[in-house]
Each structure stands twice: as structure tokens, then as C-alpha cells.
Image (cartoon, grey):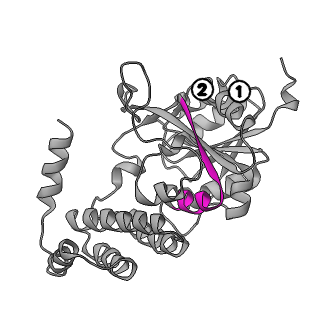
Amino acid sequence: MADPASLPLVSVICLCYNHERFISEALDSVLAQTYPNLEIIIMDDCSTDNSVRIIREYVRKYPQLTFLSTGTNQGNTRAFNLAWRASKGAYIIDFATDDVLLPERVAQQVAAFAKLDATYGVVYSDAEYIDDEGRHMRYHYKRNKAGEVISFAPSGDIFHHLLGRYFICPPTMMMRRQVFEDLQGYDKTLAYEDFDFWVRSSRRYKYFFLDAITTKRRLHAHSLSQQLYKPGDKQLNSTVLVCEKAAKLVESPEECQAMTHRLQYEARHAFLTGHYQQAEQLLNLLRQHAGLGPVYRTLHFLNKLKVDLRFLRVLYQKILNR
């Protein structure tokens, strides 16, 4: 077996905010990794529950853990930036402590990176979705009877794909440290990081899809992803800002078409969830980028009148989930 010190150091940034129900399972899953050269940093974003007490118990029991606190609640992007700048790993995992890593996760992704050249900045994989109680819900990617992935999961230069659609499960990513050095971390002004990171990193680096289930992603009522499109959701404002940045990075006709699809998608969902201000901003971006066809001119008119069609999206979701 290789000397652990000869293997690349991997920093697992464990982000916690009010995860007392899940943090023990999350930290146990990091400690159970078969990969021997880990730096484990727990960053608590000023939790108001018993998370810190649990973390301190783990730190006493496992001295290899590093515990940091933001001091005041900062939000995901700022908290992560503080942690990764304190880290030393050649590779980095952004790990929310309501999720679970499978034991071979780090070893598999480091092995994948070892076969790739420096133009690859991110390795992502498949995930299992679980509920509050850890019960299986579904997998991120669909597979055929032979177990082969039949969902869209490309590798290589995927900037235009990331512009046009969502297909990556964020907590499955392992990232080369140099990517964060080049990007100077996450954009701390945003309420969430995924879309912005994908756009900015994939403009410079390739992505690789590792065909393995490496992570359990927990879907529960208080997770950030479950707040999207709800009244008062701050993530939509961030989506508008990222779309503005992304539009400036577009270079080819293929990328232009992907950007158009993204703006149409985001404008539709903003309108159909009653976020009229953000829908207006997105439709204005669409007009500047590609123009408004008949459908989106109509949507723009309805949006100005604040016509409430939220029931259509609810109906669609019910049909989709049957």
C-alpha cells in the first residue's frame, strides 16, 4: 500500500448550519473514508441548535478534525471561502453536513483525477437521494436494466451544456485546488454557489463524469435546494446575477443558443412562481441576448400585469411526480 504522505492531500470542507439531526452521520461518513490522506475541516456558520456541541465532542474524540466558526452567520459562500483558504489540500470537496459520503468516495475520485491531465478541474458522479430518515428516494441519474447511465452526464469541455441545463448533483463534485485559486473562491455576494461555480470554472476547465454512486444527498424541508422558488427566496436574485455574468462569457453560436435556453427556463419559472421582479430582469436579459419571440413577449406582458398562474406549475409538478 502506498505511503499516505505520498498521496495527494484531499481537504473535505464540512459546512454546518443547524444540522444537529444529521451531523453525526455526516462526520462518521468522512471519518470512514478508505482514502488515507485527508484534511477534515468543519466550518460552522453560527448554528443556533446543538450542532456545535456535537462537533466539539467529535473534535475531542478525533484530534485530526479541525473546527472553525464564522463567528457570525455568513451564509454558505462566505463560510466556504473562509474554510478553503485555511485548507491545504490539492483537491477539495464541499460537503454539507446533512449529506453522507460513501466510503470509497474520495479514493475513487482521486483515482479518476490521476488519469486526467491538468485541464480537468472537476470530477463529478452519481448520487442517491435520501429523505430526513435516510430512506432511499431515487438516484440522480437514470440507468437501464444493465446498470448503464442513460441520463445526460458529459465529460470534457461542457461549458455550453452547463449554460443550458442542470444535470450535475453538486455535492458529488471533487475540485482541483487550482480552480479555486483561479476563481478566488465562490462569489461571496451570492446566496448559493453551484450555478456560478459551474459557469466560471467550466469556461477554464474540463469536467469528468465518474460513473459511480459516491454520495447520499439528503432532501429535507430546510435544505437550501428546497427553498428555491418559495416566497422570499433570495436564490433567484443570485440566479439573475449569474445569468448576467454568464451572458458575458458566451463566445460561440452553440453557447449563445444554450444561454437563450437558460434565460427562457429561468424567466418561465420565476414568472410561474410569482417572482415578477426577477422574471422582468430575466426577460430583459433575454431580450438583449436573443430577442423575445411571440411566446416570451406574451409572458412579458402577463408578467407586467402580475397575472398569477402559479397553479400551472403546481399542476405540472404533480403530473411529473406521478
Disc ID at residue 198: none
Residue 309, position in %: x, y?
12, 64
Which SS class for mark 2?
A: helix
Q: Amino acid at mark 2?
A: Asp
- 65 left or right of 288 in image: right
The answer to which of 17 and 236 lies nearer the viewer is: 236
Where 285 falls versus 38 (above or below)?
below
Residue at figure coordinates x 12%, y 57% from the top left: 311
**Label 1: few (<14), some or many (≥20) within 10 Å?**
few
User: Where is mark 1, residue-wise?
Assistant: 61
Residue at figure coordinates x 41%, y 34% from the top left: 141
Which SS class for mark 1?
A: helix
Region of the chain picked out in magenta, as a range: 196-211
Where 291 falls versus 94 (above or below)?
below
Q: CA distance from mark 2 to mark 1?
A: 12 Å
Q: Amino acid at mark 1?
A: Lys
